[in-house]
Every structure is written in structure tokens, then in C-alpha cells.
Amino acid sequence: MSKFKQIADFGQKLMALEDMDDVLKLISQEAKTLIDAQRCSIFIVDKENQILWTKLSDGISRIVVSLDNGIVGDTYQKQKPQIVNSPYTDDRFLHSIDKKSGFETKNIITVPIFDSARNIIGVIELLNKARFDFDEKDLSSLTFFANYVSGSLELILMGEK
Amino acid sequence: MKYADTYSKLADFGRELLNKKSLVEGLPLISKYVKDVIHADRCSIFIYDTQDKELWTTIADGIEKIVVSSESGLVGHTIEVKKPIIENNPYDNPLFLKEIDIQTGYKTKNIVTAPIFDSQRKIIGVLELLNKEDGFDNEDVKFMIFFAHYISGFLELTNLYMLENIKSDA
């Protein structure tokens, strides 16, 4: 099955969901399959409290970081995707999260999710690509993917307010 | 909020749209939907082919392609400024192409446009609505921006689909 057919099928499944938890779970699952990474977290921006948060998923407990903290925070600040293939030598990397979870992060890719007004509403983060490092091709696939899911995410976040 | 109820029902439209496998099937659905929601008389979706720098649209049946200039008119201007345009007095606007009304015999009373961006922030199309009874307002534009973004994933994916098919045919 082609990648594009796969995304179209995913889109249909996504539209059928109404619950925020299910939506985030499905997006995570699809992002991992698309890029072939081990873990995915979808961070949602909470401007009022100046944080980015995730739901419990994929065996990872809920993560909360401030808007200017870590590689995810930096993605928010710079409004640009980040590829970090040696996190332990990157000053922005938050070792504490690995320590807490016992998971060893080998490489990271992040992309911002923009709403229709061009505000960042979230950040998709993938960890540990199965083989090799994250590259430009992953970046363009994930950028496309972030835009593809952004409409649904914006809509569902509007409903939560 | 004028469109509050519409937003809550938009996912139903989204489900229907994603059942369409191609632009040709999807465009008439998009047109009809946005026209009904905003209460405009007509809707055109212009697709911007960045490879050929060509702007095209389809007539009502969604099949016949019409190529239009991407450098003139209010639609061309939308591409240039990358922003929506409201024009409630088109005949006073030098950018408006009166020739089209003369050719078609359709009298344009007011116009609203919104650019459609892909994930790389390149313009892949323009949404245009014509003739709302009391003219278009900012709430209409806000909905158009939201809607243009909402359908952009579908448009980008079908574009990629077409490119992939062309490649695999070659």
C-alpha cells in the first residue's frame, strides 16, 4: 500500500473520532508508522499556563514542560522543526525525562502544528528512529503530516474550550 | 459567534470529503459546502499549480478545467499578498476583472477570497465566493480562513497522489 493511500485511510479514521484522547492516540500511532520511530508524543500548547502538555499514551506518563524548556519548548519558541540526532550532547535536551521514564532517547525530531490563524497549537515529537538518524525526508513527511492533522486538532481543541 | 454551530458540525463534512479519492470528486463537494454555509451564490476553487505556475478551476460539474491568469484580478492579488480579500464594491476596485462578468453575463456584486496554503506554507489554491445578499463581513472571512486550512490537508494529499501516480505511470 502506498504511503499516500495509507494517509488517506488514516484521515478517514481520524474524522470518525470525537474524543480528544482517541484523536491524540491515533495521530501518535500514525506518526510512528509513517516515520518508523519508536515513540511519539503530541504536545498541546496551553498559553494561559505557559506549558506544553501530553496525555498519557504509549506507556509514557503525562509530560508537562514550560513553553521555553527543552527541544519541544525550543520548537515552540523558534516555530520551526528540530532534528537532534545526539540529544545527550545537546544543551536543550532534558535528561530528567529519560531518567524518570527509564527510556533512552537516541534521536529526536519535532515539528510544530499550526492552526488556521498560524498560531502553534501543538508539537509532534518522535523519538528513536528504528534505523539511521532522522533526516530531511522525515522532516518533510512529518511537516506534511502535522498540517494534515492540524484542521482536526484545531476543531477538537475548539470544542474543548 | 455566527459560525459556532457550523464548526461543531464540520467533522461531518470532513468525513464526507475524505471519502473522495481525487480532486475532481472533492472540489464540487467543497464548493457546495462552503457556499451553503456562508450563503453565497457562487463558489470557485482555484488550484495553483506551482510547477506550471498555472491557476485553474473547474465549472459546475467539476470536470472541465479552465485555466486563468494567476497574475491578474482579485484571485491573482490574493496569491500576491497571501491574504484574504473582501470586496463589497468590486466595480470600484481597479483589480476586479469586469471582462469576466461581461463574458459570462453574471453580475458580481461582492467577492471574498482566501488563500489555501500547503504544509510548506506555499499557496496551493484560492477559495472564492461571490454574491452574498448583504455583502461579506469579517466573520465570513474568519470562517473562510479556518475552512481553507481545514481542507488544505486533503488538497495537498491529493496533489501528492497525482504526482505519485504520474511518477509510477512513467
Image (cartoon, coloured by chain):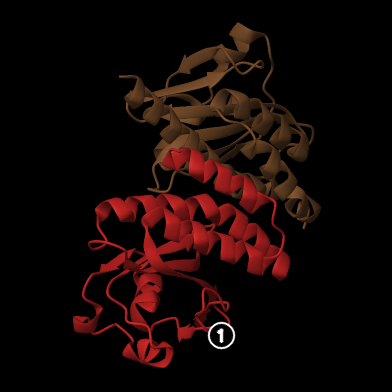
- For mark 1, does the 10 Å Cα neighbourhood hold few (<14), some (14 to 19), or many (20 or more) residues? few
- Residue visible at 71% across and 69% down? A160
Query: Which quadrant of the figure has residue B163?
Result: top left
Whether residue A116 is situated above or below residue A28 in the rendered picture = above
| Amino acid identity at mark 1 | Asn
Name chain A's colour. red
**Quadrant of the snapshot with the C terminus of chain B:** top left
Q: Is residue A160 left or right of residue A109?
A: right
Whether residue B93 is situated above or below residue B56 in the rendered picture = below
- Residue visible at 45% across and 38% down? A1
- Residue visible at 31% across and 63% down? A130
- The residue to which callout 1 is attached is A49
Query: Which quadrant of the figure has residue A157?
Result: bottom right
Name chain B's colour. brown
* Residue nearest the viewer, comparing B55 with A74: A74
Q: Is residue A58 visible?
A: yes
Q: Secondary structure at mark 1?
A: loop
Image location of residue B116, percent across then percent down: 50, 40
